[in-house]
Amino acid sequence: MTTRRDFLKDTAATAGVIFTGCSLLDAAPARAQAPGKKRLPVMLKGKRIKTIDVHAHCLIPEALALLPADEAKGIFPATKGAKQFEIVLDERLTGMDAQGVDMEVLSINPWWYRKERELVTKIIQVQNEGLAALCAKQPDRLAAFASLALQYPDLAVQQHDDAVRKYGLKGAAIGGSVAGEDFADEKFHPVWAKAEELGVTLFIHPQSTPELNKRFKGNGWLSNVIGNPLDTTIALQHLIFEGTLDKYPRLKVCAAHGGGYLGSYAPRSDHGCFISPQNCNPNIVLKKKPTEYLTQLYFDALVFTPEALRHLVAQVGASQVVIGSDHPIPWEEHPVDHIMSTKTLSDKDKAAILGGNAARMLGIKI
């Protein structure tokens, strides 16, 4: 079997890479330094802090090229196409320096869940090998989450095992559902069992809530602004209420965009089955209150304001929050400043959110 060392040794150069995100321009905090100005190292009370951004994106062009040209162009319906995201590695590192980010964990938003098995096998292989080769060029600055063909759980299990053991990736990025099927479905249990066995993280990044496309029409890009966090909320609630997190208590899950709306109205979850038991499954008896599961999940800090971050931390705990920027698309252009300017956080909390929590979650030494 090819080992990670063999793979990296045989990879003389990284394939072309397109860095891409999932949103539009956001205003920068007043304290933020000018883009392009070197920010590293980040210091807190005289102590060097290694900062880790777990929510950053890229594409592997060779994977997208496996699709017909018109279909590949449709992967980016809200943009001018993938080419606008093409950035050389040095530019990405410069951007990270300007943000004060030591390491980014790259992921690819899943666009392949409806592809047939032979094609998706090729897509995932190209993407995971491309990500591993890219990270090998800058192992102190870049890590990555693998792609998985979740529509074929047996295939996804093998892909995840290869990605971690062979390529050294830090887990896998998954959507909020699989072509409309929820993660809590038993057919996906082997995937969660493998992630738990490997001790790695599943990073949930949604692709809107397609069932509501008609309601999302109109001004405001609601398919993203509302649809993305809603899809994450639904995914997390199913993992809780269907007992998936009880079945896999060591499973590490990190949710993008602050976990959607779950943290904002979590206590309502504790009352649903009490108020209306007829709408709950009597055969599923959770081991904890629904809100208590939030403290075993991780959430990125992409919630925009100090008040929103304060509330998220109050709900899930500072130990469960990590940096998320969506780089290179500027939802949050100054993720370090976002943490540092939240006055309700202690220095210990800030250090944890800036990098300590992500390092623990991903098994990275800092």
Image: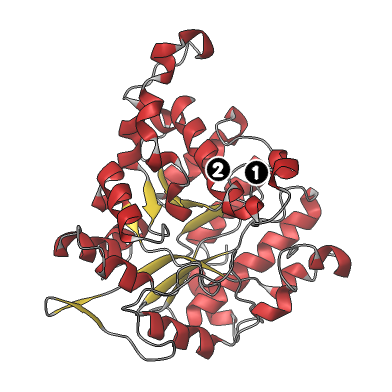
Figure quadrant of the C terminus: bottom left
| Residue to which mark 2 is pinned | 230
Residue 321: x, y in percent? 32, 54
Q: Residue furthest left?
A: 45
In the rendered image, which quarter is residue 138 located in? bottom left
| Foreground residue among 342 and 291 | 342
> Does any portion of residue 175 appear in the rendered image?
no
Circle 2: residue type: Leu
**Is 249 left, or right, of 220 in this rendering?**
left
| Foreground residue among 273 and 150 | 273
Real-space Cα distance between discs 2 and 1? 7 Å
Circle 1: residue type: Thr
Residue 234: x, y in percent? 54, 36
Q: Secondary structure at mark 1?
A: loop
| Foreground residue among 64 and 82 | 82
Q: Is residue 232 above or below residue 111?
A: above
Q: Is residue 120 above or below residue 194?
A: below
Q: Secondary structure at mark 2?
A: helix
Tell whether label 1 touches label 2 (CB within 8 Å): yes
Residue 299: x, y in percent? 39, 51
Q: Residue furthest front?
A: 219
| Residue to which mark 1 is pinned | 209
Residue in view at x 39 percent, y 13 percent: 274
Residue 221: x, y in percent? 65, 57
